[in-house]
Amino acid sequence: MVEIPHSLRSLFSAPIEEQDGTYIIEVPSSEVNHEALSANETYRVAILESPVSTESSMQEESQQSHSRETVSRAPLEPPVDEGEVRDVTIETVGDQGDGIAKVERGYVVIVPGAQPGDEPTVEIEQVQENVAFASIVDSDPRAL
């Protein structure tokens, strides 16, 4: 079984295609739309081997891939819920001076009073489609 690190930002299947002597992996637009990835950024990519395919299983994979694409284009629910308490890591500070953490799929959690590098426990107070607002319930012990 493959161990997946907590820092994983995105996971999807895609074929590798040759184009003019280079090889291309197409990233689904949903990965950018949901802010798991950003255009013009560099990412580490892990390649996992798929099982050996026969002609019929290749057709089956193609059909499954099409159904996965349909599912991945459907809007995803935010990965947090109002009232949820969780530990986050503040990555940066926004224009208003609030701490910004990213959780699953690059979903943004805004935390007033937090600074980059802080690892507070927060309570999610308001959830929107692409951002949540949280308050600190337990400060990062390293910040004391």
Image (cartoon, rainbow, N blue to C red):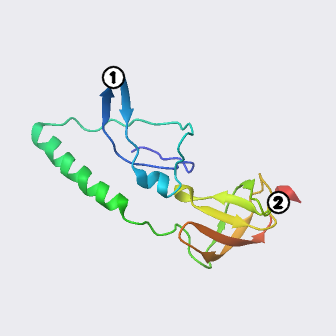
Q: Compared with residue 143, is residue 61 higher up or lower down, i.e. above or below?
A: above
Instruction: Answer with left or right where residue 109 lies relative to residue 19.
Output: right
**Residue 126 in picture, x, y percent from top left:** 63, 77
Q: Amino acid at mark 2?
A: Pro
Q: Which numbered marker is on residue 20?
A: 1
Earlier residue among tags 2 and 1: 1
User: Residue, x 69% and y 65% (percent of image)?
Assistant: 110
**Which quadrant of the view contains residue 108?**
bottom right
Relative side of 56 to 133, left or right: left
* Left/right of residue 33 with respect to residue 85 in the rendered view: left
Q: Mark 2 vs mark 1: give the one in front.
A: 1
Say if 87 sits above or below 134 in the image: above
Q: How many marks?
A: 2
Give the residue furthest to the top: 21
x then y, percent, for residue 59: 14, 44
Q: Amino acid at mark 1?
A: Asp
Locate the N terminus and report the quarter of the image it occupies.
Answer: top left
Residue at point 52% right, 50% down? 9
Mark 2 to mark 1 CA distance (whole Å): 54 Å
Residue that appears at 74% across and 59% down: 94
Q: Give the label on residue 137, or none.
A: none
Quadrant in which the C terminus appears:
bottom right
Quarter of image, res 115: bottom right
The secondary element bearing badge 2 is classed as helix
Q: What residue does disc 2 label? A: 141
Q: What residue is shown at x 56% (from left), y 36% (from top)?
A: 42
Q: Using a 10 Å C-alpha cutoff, classify the residue at mark 1 as few (fewer than 14 neighbours), some (14 to 19) or many (20 or more).
A: few
Q: Nearer the viewer, residue 33 or 120?
A: 33
